[in-house]
Image: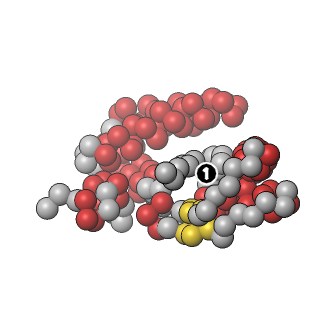
Amino acid sequence: MGVVVLFRHAQASFLEPNYDKLSNLGEAQARLLGEYWARNKIVFDRACTGPCVRQKDTLAIVSAVYRKAGTPFPDPLVLQEFEEYRGEVVLDRSLPGLLQDDQVIRDLHAAFQSSTGSAGKRATFQKLFEAIIGKWVREEICPPGCGDVVGILLPSKFRPH
């Protein structure tokens, strides 16, 4: 019986202008994962990735580690179905209106803006992000160009008719 191994991309560049790239820590995480799998002689027949740069780069680093160890690694197949929902687009397109109309969002945004240090920024951003994405998932907001939640989370063949 075959085994499917799923893993999320390594750490992206959180709170950077371009989130869709690996951070230095993310590159190290991908290298360590590749080293662990190669050292333990875990062989893959097929490798798939999503279309995001951070996804492809994670797999490219793992693959390079395998090849350096003399272990074959399959060429990746890019699957559009593995694209993550565009949370940053939902945030960008929703935040201006929510800042005008929603006191909770205004308070969370103010906390994020006034937070200091990496840990503080991450924690306050996460709360703001969860509040906005929650509104989107509950269909309380529908920012232009973000699609519907069901359409993004479910392939068309599984959508209710």
- For the residue pair 71 and 129, the one nearer the viewer reads as 71
- For the residue pair 97 and 40, the one nearer the viewer reads as 40
- Residue 40, placed above or below residue 2: above
- Residue 137, placed above or below residue 69: above
Residue for point 55% across, 69% down: 78
Residue for point 66% across, 70% down: 75
Tell me the crowding category of disc 1: few under 14, some 14 to 19, or many 20 or more residues within 10 angstroms, Cα based: many
Question: What amino acid is labelled 1 in the image?
Answer: His
Residue wearing tag 1 = 9
Residue 23 placement (x, y as % from top left): 72, 50
Residue 19 placement (x, y as % from top left): 62, 54
- For the residue pair 46 and 83, the one nearer the viewer reads as 46
**Is residue 158 visible to the viewer in this orientation of the structure?**
yes
Q: How many marks?
A: 1
Q: Is residue 98 left or right of residue 45?
A: left
**Is residue 24 visible to the viewer in this orientation of the structure?**
no
Residue 69 placement (x, y as % from top left): 85, 57
Query: Tag 1, which secondary structure?
Result: loop
Residue 59 placement (x, y as % from top left): 67, 59
- Residue 146, placed above or below residue 9: below
Say which quarter of the image contains residue 85. bottom left
Residue for point 73% across, 56% down: 62
Residue for point 64% across, 58% down: 44
- Residue 122, placed above or below residue 18: above
